[in-house]
Amino acid sequence: MRILIIEPFNGGSHAAWAEGYSRHSSHAVEVLGLPGKNWKWRMQGAAVTLARRYRELLENGKRYDLIIASDMLDLAAFLGLISKLSGPRLPVALYFHENQLTYPQSANEQARPDGRDRKFGLINFTSALAADTCFFNSAFHRQSFLEALPPFLNRFPDCRELEAVSEIENKSEVLHLGLDLERLLSFRPVDSVLEKPNRPPLILWNHRWEYDKNPADFFAVLRDLVASGYDFEVAILGEHYYPQPELFLENRTFLGRRLLHFGYAESFSDYAAWLWRADILPVTSYHDFFGASVIEAVYCHCYPLLPRRLAYPEHLPGSDNNRFFYSDYNDLYTKLKSLLDCIKETRSACPGSLVAHYDWSVLAPQ
């Protein structure tokens, strides 16, 4: 098949997914995208630019069998703009990396009387209606989106089209995110951590520096560990924008010599090296539609402590894996102390095989 991925926000995890599928698929996959910035404008206006560029591709002799659009595209507008093209309409799949109905509101949005601007959620709704199939990157994501649609639509004065929710549900499936996990293997250090028994445990943060990742609780538990006299080191990775958040700067000073790295890893090799070196990943996120950074760390044998909610339980199913989950802050603190107390056992208790099924070698055929 000849597949065209249309990605208005072609950056970060969106670009990684599109490029990863392009490299690993047995089909001929191309990506038509715009730079990953100005997300609000991308959702509202990118359909016009991308429809024009799509027409130009066809005029230059390109032909496709399938379109895969991301949730950042106003798909209904895009299809309307290309409706006059000759030939049958191609089948179109919509891939939801995230959605604007259940994404946590920022402080600015919470301060607004009406919260988040509804037009972004409405774009997700009409795009889902326009698609032939909707794919969600986790079962949690699919369920939360479908459950959020009725209360969202009921906020409008009339013509709420609630019956459309069932229509979307019937054409929605789960298609987990593919990740280039095997690439991480080439950066695995030759020397084993078990050969360095005196090295302090290394605690990792490898998420975006954003409110929805709940850095406040992450730093709070580190401060509680310091107050209890625990010896450990910290690596703070992850994408962020300038100026750096005050909370991170304050804790940079507080952690002092414990902090081995602070900031975005400029190369994949540097990022991978920190994942392989890290021992424990305490995740405090309020929200995660999938959690690619968690999967990458676990693949590198970093022990995760995850909230028992969001998408995380479907990544590590089964009663044998309950040890990786916590119920509240006190449970997180208690389990984190236990992992530090038994760091030798912790370092060998999380094999990467637990999440190897998210590698492109498995998911590209799916």
Image (cartoon, rainbow, N blue to C red):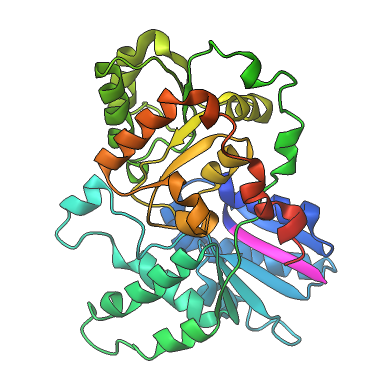
Relative horizontal placement of residue 255, taking residue 4 as reference (left or right) = left
Give the residues drawn in magenta, as a range.
Answer: 1-7
Seen at 61% across and 28% down, the residue is 271
- Residue ranking furthest to the top: 257
Asked where in the image residue 205 lies, by quadrant, the reply is top left
Q: Position of residue 102 (x, y in %)?
A: 35, 62
In the image, residue 143 lies in the stretch drawn in magenta? no
Q: Nearer the viewer, residue 202 or 192?
A: 192
In the image, residue 3 lies in the stretch drawn in magenta? yes
Seen at 36% across and 41% down, the residue is 284
Q: Position of residue 75 (x, y in %)?
A: 54, 72
Relative horizontal placement of residue 206, taking residue 231 as reference (left or right) = right
Q: Is residue 80 visible?
A: yes
Q: Position of residue 103 (x, y in %)?
A: 36, 57
- 122 shown above or below 348: below
Relative horizontal placement of residue 10, taking residue 88 as reference (left or right) = left
